[in-house]
Image: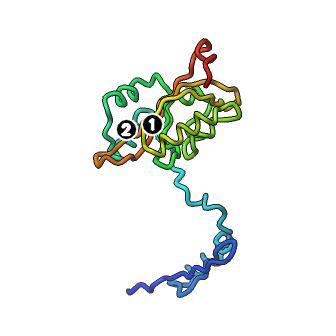
């Protein structure tokens, strides 16, 4: 028995799209389309419907999965820092969207992985964060260069903390920057007095 082709015409209109069924395979397909028509006529908002919001990568397996998928070439320093787990780790893509945070990050900031992944690290910054330091970091990232700095960030409960941040580009085997990794360490009270 030959199957009939099924086609659907999509009409784009201002504020959304409408799916118009045509040449359905049979009466059952048309019945299903009619039942679900209201859900098909919702407007497209800001494109958030299409963001990849896959479950966050967690634990050592999380960064190791990123390393494998992106074909990282890790220096001895980066590998040792990642394996130690002593510092908060934030891994972003080249567009500065967070792809991974470790447990130390969660403890330091109060944000769980699900709340951080998909956002930019700047969500931790606030009024007391130095604009000059932020600009230096942005410039270094734009040039794909490593940078160190002190930064005032804010926890989930909005309490400020000073941290030392080391940002490093991560290269793949083709020597292309594929990710950035930030190692963050909260500074003790005696070190906080220096300007962040």
Q: Say which quadrant the C terminus sits in.
A: top right
Give the numbered dot on residue 91.
none
Q: Say which quadrant the N terminus sits in.
A: bottom left
Quarter of the figure with residue 31: bottom right
**Rendering coords of residue 125 (x, y %):** 64, 35
* In front: label 2 or label 1: 1
Left or right placement of residue 84 versus residue 122 in this view: left
Closest to the observer: 160 or 21? 160
Residue drawn at 54 percent across, 81 percent down: 8
Instruction: List the single residue furthest toward the top.
Output: 190
Residue drawn at 40 percent across, 29 percent down: 82
- Residue designated by label 1: 181
> Of label 2 and label 1, which has the lower sequence position?
2
Left or right placement of residue 17 versus residue 174 in this view: right
177, above or below 185, in the image = below
Give the numbered dot on residue 64.
2
**Rendering coords of residue 70 (x, y %):** 36, 47
Q: Gap between marks 2 and 1, in whole Å?
A: 13 Å
Residue drawn at 49 percent across, 32 percent down: 102
């Amino acid at each position: 028995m030959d199957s009939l082709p099924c086609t659907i015409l999509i009409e784009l209109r201002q504020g959304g799209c409408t799916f118009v069924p045509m040449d359905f395979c049979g009466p059952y397909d048309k019945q299903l389309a009619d039942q679900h028509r209201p859900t098909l006529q919702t407007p497209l908002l800001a494109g958030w419907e299409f963001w990849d919001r896959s479950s966050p990568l967690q634990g050592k397996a999380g960064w190791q999965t990123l390393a494998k998928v992106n074909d990282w070439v890790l220096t001895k320093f980066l590998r040792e820092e990642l394996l130690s787990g002593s510092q908060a780790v934030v891994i972003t893509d080249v567009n500065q969207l967070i792809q991974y945070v470790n447990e130390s990050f969660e403890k330091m900031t109060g944000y769980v992985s699900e709340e951080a992944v998909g956002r930019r690290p700047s969500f931790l910054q606030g009024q007391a964060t130095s604009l000059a330091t932020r600009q230096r970091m942005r410039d270094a990232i734009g040039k794909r260069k490593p940078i160190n700095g002190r930064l005032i960030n804010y926890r989930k409960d909005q309490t400020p903390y000073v941290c030392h941040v080391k940002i490093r580009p991560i290269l793949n085997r083709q020597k292309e920057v594929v990710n950035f990794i930030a190692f963050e360490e909260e500074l003790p009270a005696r070190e906080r007095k220096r300007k962040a």
